[in-house]
Image: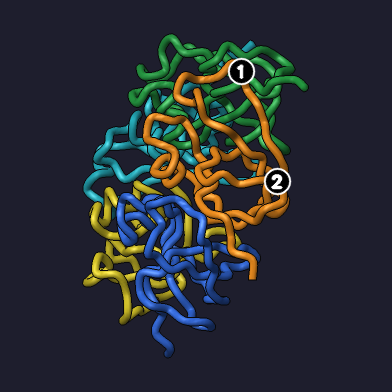
Chain colours: A cyan, B yellow, C blue, D green, E orange
Amino acid sequence: MLLGTVEGNIWSTKKSPGLLGKSFLTVRVGEQLLICADCVGAGEGERVLVATGGAARVAAGKDAPVDAAVVGIVDQT
Amino acid sequence: MLLGTVEGNIWSTKKSPGLLGKSFLTVRVGEQLLICADCVGAGEGERVLVATGGAARVAAGKDAPVDAAVVGIVDQT
Amino acid sequence: MLLGTVEGNIWSTKKSPGLLGKSFLTVRVGEQLLICADCVGAGEGERVLVATGGAARVAAGKDAPVDAAVVGIVDQT
Amino acid sequence: MLLGTVEGNIWSTKKSPGLLGKSFLTVRVGEQLLICADCVGAGEGERVLVATGGAARVAAGKDAPVDAAVVGIVDQT
Amino acid sequence: MLLGTVEGNIWSTKKSPGLLGKSFLTVRVGEQLLICADCVGAGEGERVLVATGGAARVAAGKDAPVDAAVVGIVDQT
């Protein structure tokens, strides 16, 4: 998985049916910005684990056309 | 998913049978140009969500040899 | 998919059984050279659509160990 | 697979159900930091083999939303 | 697939069960070093075709947690 930081939300009204009811976060991973399905209720500024590719659909559901999902919030230490 | 901007269309007459009847958009994602199956009716200049890999086939159909698909148009805010 | 230009052919006599009978093209995609199964009969110098990952096996056959395939020839305009 | 070096551990209390009971390592692969499910009991400083994508789930279990897993410790020679 | 050059072997005694009995090659692909399951008996210095992702498991077996495999030796011309 990748380590990222949640920057905010993004909305899309016109989208594939498989994305209905999901919420999306913009997550910065190094220099890249990924749009991730939120599977854990993460909020802005939190450090998160991002699963990519098929792993994202294990978390978000196999019928969702997503390739990135927030699957964990990193514990602060 | 990736955030991109639709730049235009691309046509291919000689192609794999699984691509028949699909329309393709050229989408700029950072410095990269991706050819995406259009699953939402996006147009030039619109900011879109691009699903890659197997996620593209969840949206475009599992028998289509596509690895990138436009799955959402980002709401303007 | 990616936009590339066919540079030539490549041959491999000693290979995995699943590659038997397939022809392979060297395709330039930006700065990268990809070896692609040819699914449309593309020739040197043509601009082509390259499908990667599982999408390549949708076009080339699921028992072929290929991760890149030429799935379309871009129309000249 | 990729060659990496284990840098440490990472903990996430709030996570997808499929990640419960797994331990995660931070692994440096070149300039990139990957969070990997630990499938072999690797420790800090060890050189390891990292499997990515679906290969990670072959090792870690298909219901785990992981896209990277430590699948081997490289023998010292 | 990617074009690479075999640099040598790598051994791992402590590894995932699915890797037992497989031999691994270090293969240079441009600036990157990939650890590949050897499916064709390639040797040091040979130019090879590397299949990545799920394609590697088509060649190496679906129960092997590998994401890269040498699937062909390029003919010298």
**Furthest residue in direction right, as rendered:** D77
Q: Nearer the viewer, residue B9 or D51?
A: D51
Q: Is residue B77 visible?
A: no
Rendering coords of residue E37 (x, y %): 54, 38
Rendering coords of residue A54 (x, y %): 38, 38
SS under mark 1:
loop
SS under mark 2:
loop
Local crowd at mark 1 within 10 Å, few (<14), some, or many (≥20)? few
In terms of image quadrants, where is residue E57?
A: top left
Residue B4: mark in rendering: none
Q: Nearer the viewer, residue A35 or D59?
A: D59
User: Relative to A13, does residue B46 appear above or below in the rendering?
Assistant: below
User: The numbered mark 1 sits on a residue in which chain?
Assistant: E
Q: Is residue C60 visible?
A: yes
Horizontally, residue E17 falls left or right of residue D25, namely left
User: At x 32% / y 50%, what residue is drawn?
Assistant: C63
User: Relative to B16, does residue D65 appear above or below in the rendering?
Assistant: above
User: At x 38% / y 22%, what residue is drawn?
Assistant: D61
User: The numbered mark 2 sits on a residue in which chain?
Assistant: E
Question: Which of marks 2 and 1 precedes in the sequence?
Answer: 1
User: At x 23% / y 71%, what residue is drawn?
Assistant: B20
User: Relative to D72, does residue C29 appear above or below in the rendering?
Assistant: below
Give the spatial CA distance, label 1 vs label 2. 21 Å
Q: Which residue has dot 2 on it?
A: E44
In terms of image quadrants, where is residue D34?
A: top right
Q: Which residue has dot 1 on it?
A: E13
Q: Nearer the viewer, residue B10 or C10?
A: C10
**Furthest residue in direction bottom, as rendered:** C77
In terms of image quadrants, where is residue D14?
A: top left
Amino acid residing under circle 2: Glu
